[in-house]
Image (spheres, rainbow, N blue to C red):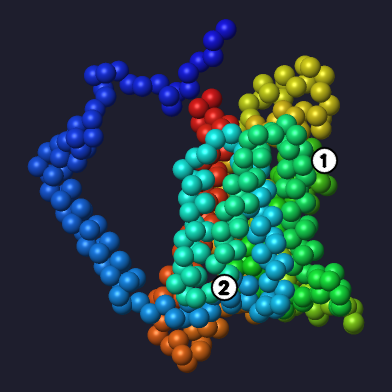
Amino acid sequence: MTSLTPAKDIMPPPTERSTVLGWMKKNLFGSIGDTILTFVAGGFLLWLIYAIVKWIFTTAQWAAVTDNLQLYMKGQYPASEDWRLWLLMFLLALVVGLAWGIFLKRAEAVGWVLLIIPVVLALWLISLHREAWWKFLVVDVLAILGYFLGKRYPRKLARPTYILILLYMPLTILIVRGLGENGFMKLVPTNLWGGLLLSLLLAIFGIVFSFPIGVLLALGRQSKMPALKMLSVIYIELIRGVPLITLLFMGQLMLPFFLPAGITIDRVIRATVAIIMFAAAYMAENVRGGLQSIPKGQYEAADVVGLSGWQKMVFIILPQALRAVIPVLVGQFIGLFKDTSLVALVGLLDLLGIARGILANPNYIGRQLEVFAFIAMIYWVFSYGMSYASGRLETSLGVGER
């Protein structure tokens, strides 16, 4: 039995195929109006590109960025402990390389982009006379090594790679925070965490923990148990009825008044819990939409084969529901990552908080455009990365095709 050719690989009939010039004639110069619009839009685009490039290389003054790269990346994290952050980056490069070699099997365009980025950063640091440039090249070396090892020994390394992926976040917190007051890996309090480091930690923990909580809330709202359904509905509607900044202010300013004397909760933990609570409520509604999209026949088929209630939900219904709402979930993850910038309003020095502090320096007055352009680029890179990963996942799962 031969397998069917995927729809994306089926070529159109010869009469419908066209060259590049044919496509341009059909879509850009098909009529006088199209031709005029093409020239106007093309001229505006060229002018815009020229203006941006000219501003970047001749007008903009990047001292507010280049002089404070350490602050943007890690806040006030001690320089003597930078080796921990590099260790985590090296481990991440190895894990990504292993996963790519084992699960994707082949190099793709985005893989080359990921390899080029550290090289560009290394060249940039060389131009700034920074000593850390070689560490970015080590990142590339470890990623390439992991890729070839994963491709060469996929069966042997599959389980260790899964374990590394699952343990990476606990290891991150352990390494970043430290073990004790003295000795190896001294404790680094969270008030010294900042910049991109803090933004990523808040976003990752918000995404990782809000997902299972949101799924449970969605299942609770669909439950036939009145008490469980009522509690789920109350939580979802209450949290969705207030903005995230309200929860952040409640966690940072109001919660200490309700705690017993002598008991304090770390500010970063309070912000993380607020983000998780907020994201879980929206996650629940997205997952509930996926559950409602599953045909009734799927439930009946699961009952016919004798599956229990939890088996039916875990193995039949929930996988289909999550697959149907992948674009919505990723859109929420991207929004959550950008929403972490709100913690700057409650005194945490994330990427935006660091930028505001730098702009308050008299040496960098009037450099708002350069600073915020740099921060916007960082947010765009990570947001586009999640969007691209979502697209690849949708393609592999055939979302929208069957």
Instruction: Using the image as rendered, state which of residue 193 and residue 279 is in the foreground.
Output: 193
Real-space CA distance between mark 2 and mark 1, rounded to the nearest whole angstrom: 62 Å
Instruction: Indicate the position of residue 61 as horizontal and vertical percent values.
Output: 38, 80
Mark number, residue 225? 1
Residue depicted at 60% across the width and 63% down the height: 135
Which residue is under mark 2?
131
Q: Residues within 10 Å of mark 1 (few under 14, many from 20)?
A: few
Instruction: Using the image as rendered, state which of residue 363 and residue 132 is in the foreground.
Output: 132
**Which residue type does callout 2 highlight?**
Glu
Mark number, residue 367? none
Name the quadrant containing residue 311.
top right
Instruction: Indicate the position of residue 147 as horizontal and vertical percent values.
Output: 61, 42
The quadrant the C terminus occupies is top right
Instruction: Describe residue 380's horizontal placement relative to residue 48 as left or right.
Output: right
Task: Tell me if residue 42 comes above or below residue 200 in the rendering.
Answer: above
Q: Which callout, 2 or 1, points at the residue further toward the start of the chain?
A: 2
Look at the numbered disc 1 and give the secondary structure of its residue: loop
